[in-house]
Image: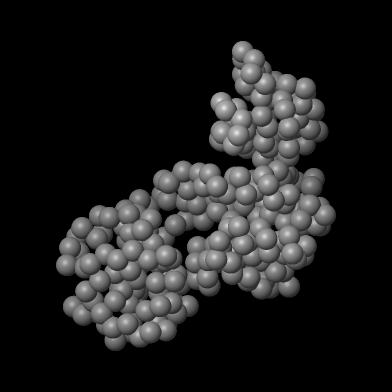
């Protein structure tokens, strides 16, 4: 049985992503209140695996998670892309004519803005979590309240789904990273099948320093899929570049990394893994 640390509770999107990634495997969830707690959990338990969101197709990157990942010493061994789906649910005894307010995380409420505008009599109330809203309504038997959450969370907490797929954007996905202690990495991924990597580096203050790195990656047929810059705290106007690349040849990828090392400062490979397909 694998021990999986997530941010959030049972029924959260992190829970759903973890179960989809480890489908057909037995897992034990360790639910953490924050992403900081998630990484602390992995440090205390070297056998634990973490699943954490890193970017969303609408909201963009979770910048703080990049910082936590870089400082944690963990290694990325996989990724998962989860379709973000919302439903509105309530106590089994309630229905459209008995609910008066809907609770959820502010981002979820924002992602269902059009639906809520079509139900203007419903009072939207911000909460800390989507699944947490469902859990609170269920455990406290809150008649007249509804929650916006994933339909799996509604079923988990015994709530009735009034309407599914209420999100405004039907092409909303969140990308999750799967991380663990570096000593366990090779046991949990087929290294000969990896075709994606995440790296981080800084650059000297020199003209064309970034373009030279990108030119070398192109020469080795390395495809740049993402680049994210973050300021280095305490070093004015200096930045860390977080880069995701995909490749078809592991040897050429590693040759490319060796070729850019002299042009970068503090380069670090955050992980090498198999690129996830988009979940439909």
Outermost residue to the top: 207
Q: In this view, does 246 lie to the left or right of 89?
A: right
User: How many circles with numbers are drawn on the protein?
Assistant: 0
Residue 138, x across and y down, in percent: 40, 82
Q: Please determine whether, in this image, residue 263 is positioned above or below residue 52.
A: above
Q: Please report the residue visible at 37 percent of the width from the left and 66 percent of the height from the top.
A: 127
Q: Can residue 69 be seen in this view?
A: yes
Residue at 21% in and 80% down: 98
**Residue 260 image offset from top left, x and y in percent:** 74, 24
| Horizontal relation, residue 104 to residue 252: left or right | left
Residue 177 place in picture, x, y as percent: 62, 52
In this picture, residue 102 sits left or right of residue 121: right
Which quadrant would residue 145 be assigned to in this image?
bottom left
Q: Residue at x 47, y 56 (%)?
A: 83
Q: How is the image coloured?
A: one colour
> Splitting the image into 4 quarters, where does residue 166 fall?
bottom left
* Residue occupying image coordinates x 73% and y 37%: 268
Furthest toward the front, the residue is 234
150 shown above or below 222: below
Can residue 49 be seen here? The reply is no
Identify whether 133 is placed above or below 267: below
State which quarter of the image contains the N terminus.
bottom right
274 is higher (above) or lower (below) than 5: above
Give residue 41's position: percent from left, percent from top. 68, 64
């Amino acid at each position: 049985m694998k021990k999986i640390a997530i941010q959030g509770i049972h029924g959260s999107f992190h829970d759903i992503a973890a179960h989809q990634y480890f489908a057909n495997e037995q897992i034990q969830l360790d639910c953490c209140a924050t992403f900081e707690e998630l990484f602390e959990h992995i440090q205390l338990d070297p056998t634990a695996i973490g699943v954490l969101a890193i970017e969303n197709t609408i909201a963009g990157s979770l910048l703080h998670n990049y910082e936590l990942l870089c400082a944690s010493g963990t290694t990325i061994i996989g990724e998962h892309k989860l379709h973000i789906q919302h439903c509105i649910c309530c106590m089994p005894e309630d229905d459209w004519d008995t609910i008066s307010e809907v609770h959820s995380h502010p981002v979820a409420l924002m992602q269902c803005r059009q639906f809520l505008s079509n139900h203007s009599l419903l009072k939207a109330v911000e909460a800390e979590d989507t699944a947490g809203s469902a859990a609170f309504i269920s455990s406290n038997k809150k008649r007249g309240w509804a929650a916006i959450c994933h339909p799996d969370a509604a079923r988990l907490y015994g709530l009735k789904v009034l309407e599914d797929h209420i999100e405004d954007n039907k092409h909303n996905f969140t990308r999750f990273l799967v991380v663990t202690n570096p000593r366990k990495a090779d046991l949990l991924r087929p290294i000969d099948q990896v075709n994606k990597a995440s790296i981080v580096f800084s650059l000297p203050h020199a003209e064309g320093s970034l373009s030279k790195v990108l030119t070398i990656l192109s020469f080795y047929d390395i495809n740049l899929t993402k680049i994210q810059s973050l300021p280095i705290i305490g070093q004015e106007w200096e930045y860390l570049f977080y880069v995701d690349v995909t490749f078809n040849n592991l040897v050429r990828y590693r040759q490319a990394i060796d070729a850019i090392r002299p042009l970068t400062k503090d380069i670090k490979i955050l992980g090498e893994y198999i690129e996830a397909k988009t979940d439909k």
